[in-house]
Amino acid sequence: MSDTAAGWAYGAYGVMSTFFGLMCGWFIDYMGVRASLLVGALVGAFSRFVMALAVSKGTALFMLYTLLPFAECLGIPIMTIGIKRYTNARNRTFAFSLFYSMMNVAALCAGPLVDLSRSTFGDGFTVHIDPLGLDVRFTGLRLIILTSSVATAAMCIIVAIGIREIQVDESGSIREFIPNRESPMQQTMTVLREPAFWRLTVFTLLLVGVRLVFRHIDATMPKYMVRQFGPSAPFGLIYAINPFLIIFLVPIVGLVARKIDSFSMILAGSFVSAVSPFWLCFKQTYFSMVLFMVTLSIGEAVYSPRVYDYTMAVSAEGAEGLYSSLSSAPLFSVKLVVGGMSGWLLTSFMPADGPHHGNILWGIIGLTSLTSPILMFLLRDYISPPSEQGNRPHSDAENASDHLKSDRQEDRTDAIRSLKMESTPVHIDEDEDEDEDEGDQGYDNDYENFSNSASASSLPQERQAFLSSNPQQYTMPSTHDLKEVDITSAVSPARDSKD
């Protein structure tokens, strides 16, 4: 394949990943974590095995565009949902960091193994398969696909033995989780009406720019290094720098910065990762490649685990699969963008025969990546959570509740202060009078001594409902202990207008 054809093949794989991702959202919520992982592992093992043995380009492309992207959609997204259900707010951020580190352990092993396979089996070897009557020639890369098929098959055993359909609540108790059995249309319409979903979608779309860098490592960097440094260029070893650093950096960053809100971490980390390609604009050397990968890894360690945390935090319980699939559609489209972009960049600036301009190639990649942190900063008021508790964003319901509680506390204080300033006499016990100088606590005590015979209808409906629903917190004395109070004047007009 030419550079352009290979790039578009990679992009088409991204398009099919988007399609299956959208289709699998409801399937994930319906089947649950355990069943979805089993199906994904079985389909993935089969599709990789067929690709490893394929003797025609058509068969390989068919698997690349059908079963393989379907299996990919039932892999990492399901694991993130499982982590959300197996943890609570106290340990979820660290759990996502640990999960991200384990993924990079696999990536760290994969990089050197790719180089080893290429160097050992560079000329390939032929295997005769008697039952099929085929002679299959295994190159180094074909052997890698075969071993990945075996590893994916082993995952089926692990899932069958070690995964349960459970959920851990905020108290640490474990209960059975029942998957969502609503119809696909009903689930989709419910999710599309949620403001949190659209905020998540915009946020995911803005991440496309910085994600381009990582996809260019897959699609552009190998050919770039071979043409810049020669056919023996160890791009697998250079690639391994990233997972090696991530393994150690992510848990450390997760532990040290656990009290910093997710959006701030994502914004800072995405900026660091976005500027990393500019190292290669200065000089085309191995040292520049190392600086590029180190800078990229530092930014990734800061922001990438928090993306999982952010996504799962704003997703509705039981609909995490649909939230993830619909909102992640822009990320799958990155492969299409990078596929076409990679082919054009390599043909224009790093052709197989002709002058090389790698500095321009990586400068263009860096500029496109910078769009992510810049746009996220400009739209931060919309996409960042209104407030955060500990490490996780509040849901819209929690934020509304917090604001309501704050307003009610202000109402109580304003009401007492207004009442103190009125000429209408108010009876206050002597003990309470001694506490007046203690600030709002004295006001709260006076508020609790309002006469329950006063005209409750003069209070706003919201405050009436709140007092009625909290009798244990606002128990009022009988009327014979108090003088008559005109409570109408105790309500602040300014506060009423806000209510």
Image (tube, rainbow, N blue to C red):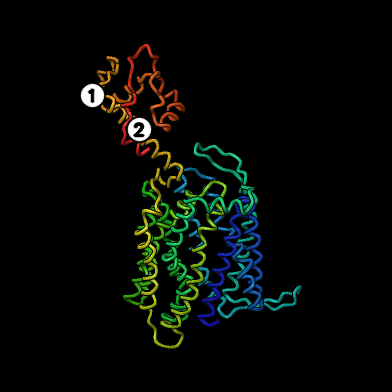
Q: Residue at x 26, y 24 (%)?
A: 422
How many angstroms separate mark 1 from mark 2 (CA)?
19 Å
Residue farthest left in this picture: 437
450, 488: nearer the viewer: 488
Name the residue furthest right. Answer: 131
Q: Is residue 212 left or right of residue 374?
A: right
Label at residue 488: none
Mark closest to the chain's N terminus, 1 or 2: 2
Please indicate, yes or no, whether residue 445 appears anywhere in the rendered image: no
Q: Is residue 370 above or below residue 429?
A: below
Badge 2 marks a residue whose secondary structure is helix
Q: Percent position (x, y) of residue 424? A: 27, 20
Residue type at mark 1 is: Asp
In-front residue for pair 279/456: 456
In the picture, the quarter occupied by the N terminus is bottom right
Q: Which residue is mark 1?
A: 437
Please indicate whether residue 291 sits to the left or right of residue 437 in the image: right
Q: Mark 2 = which residue?
A: 409
Query: Residue 431's spot in the image, x, y percent?
Result: 28, 15
Where does the image place residue 377, in percent across and percent down from the top left?
35, 59
* Vertical order, 286 against 160 (above or below): below
